[in-house]
Image (tube, grey):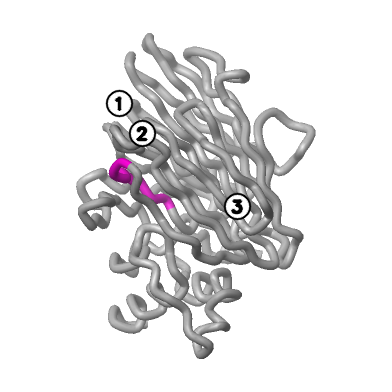
Amino acid sequence: MDRKKFIKKSLIIGLAGSVIPSLTKADESAKKSTYDKLMNQVGFNHLPNQQGITTMNTVLHKANTRGSANHGWLEVNHSFSFANYYNPDRMHFGVLRVLNDDKIAPSRGFGTHPHDNMEIITIPLEGALRHKDSMGNGAVIQNGDVQVMSAGTGIQHSEFNAKDDQHVKLLQIWLFPNRKNVAPRYDQISIRDIETKNEFYQILSPSADDQGVWIHQDAWFHLGEFDQEVSTRYNMNKSGNGVYAFIIEGTAEIAGQSLEKRDGFGIWNVADFDIKVQKGSRILLMEVPMTLS
């Protein structure tokens, strides 16, 4: 797909982080096309092939190589192709399709727009975000919370900075689900209630009975905040999964790779790997399936 066609399709589906256009009757199908349009854009980069790879694979995305845009009220960095940013080598990591690092001006935000068949995770880093959706949910999420939405058969929602005197900074993450057309759902928790200092603690899984929130995907997210140097080892929860690490703050070494603030690093075809974290670091580990089902 060439760049012009990609940009046109991205704008039609109203991706968060772009200008949301009004939908005419001719665009009605766009309301139910998030999954299909994004699925059509993925290639096979960053997916293991089907020929029995047995050695560790990695991909490094340095912070300064991300796509970026400044809309005045919104500053955003894209780890993967999104809206006006298109890089055929940066389409996804397994089922992880979107990782946006957003900064939204006071009282500004995204007007009501649709999604379907996506698992959407929002993690505020500073400030507070006001959410409203077509399921009747209205909430404010802030640093120390995590929010999930299963878009399923279709939802509409809006997101605005809840403060009029400070920016809100957040990560928004989209995963392809392992089940399509489920009933839409919303959940939000305070991760301050489950955090463990100087360890990676689970904030998301496939099970409602586990710690943290849950989604329709065999994915596990762990977050860690460190005020001292720590060496640890991560063990995959499921064979065939990979981990995409995102350095929110600080520095670390993962599987021998040195990483700095806002770097992304993917690793797969391993059962486990070593992590060395430096003092003053905050890191998100996203374990996801490497094949799309």
Amino acid type assigned to the residue bearing label 1 in the image: Thr
x%, y% of residue 58? 40, 47
- Over which residues does the magenta segment extend? 99-106
**Residue that carries the numbered disc 2 in the rendered image:** 247
Q: Is residue 39 above or below residue 143?
A: below
Label 1, on which residue? 251
Secondary structure state at the residue bearing disc 1? loop
Residue at 38% x, 9% y: name it.
228
- Name the residue tied to disc 3: 289
**Residue at 59 percent of width and 60 percent of height:** 118
Label 2: state its secondary structure. strand
Proximity of marks 2 and 3: CB atoms separated by less than 8 Å = no
Q: Is residue 14 above or below residue 246?
A: below
Mark on residue 183?
Answer: none
Dividing the picture into quadrants, the one containing residue 22 is: bottom left
Q: Quadrant of residue 148?
A: top right
Nearer to me, 73 or 276: 73
Residue 273 at x, y percent in the picture: 50, 32
Of the two numbered discs 2 and 3 in the rendering, the one whose residue sits closer to the viewer: 2
Q: Could you say which is closer to the camera, residue 58 or residue 11?
A: 11
| Residue shown at the point (76%, 59%) measured from the top left | 183
Q: Main secondary structure of the magenta part?
A: strand
- In the rendered structure, are the residues bearing label 2 and label 1 in contact, judged by CB atoms less than 8 Å apart? yes
Few, some or many C-alpha atoms within 10 Å of disc 2 (few <14, some 14-19, many ≥20)?
A: many
Q: Which kind of residue does numbered mark 3 sit on?
A: Pro
- Asked whether the beta carbons under mark 3 and mark 1 sit within 8 Å of each other, the answer is no
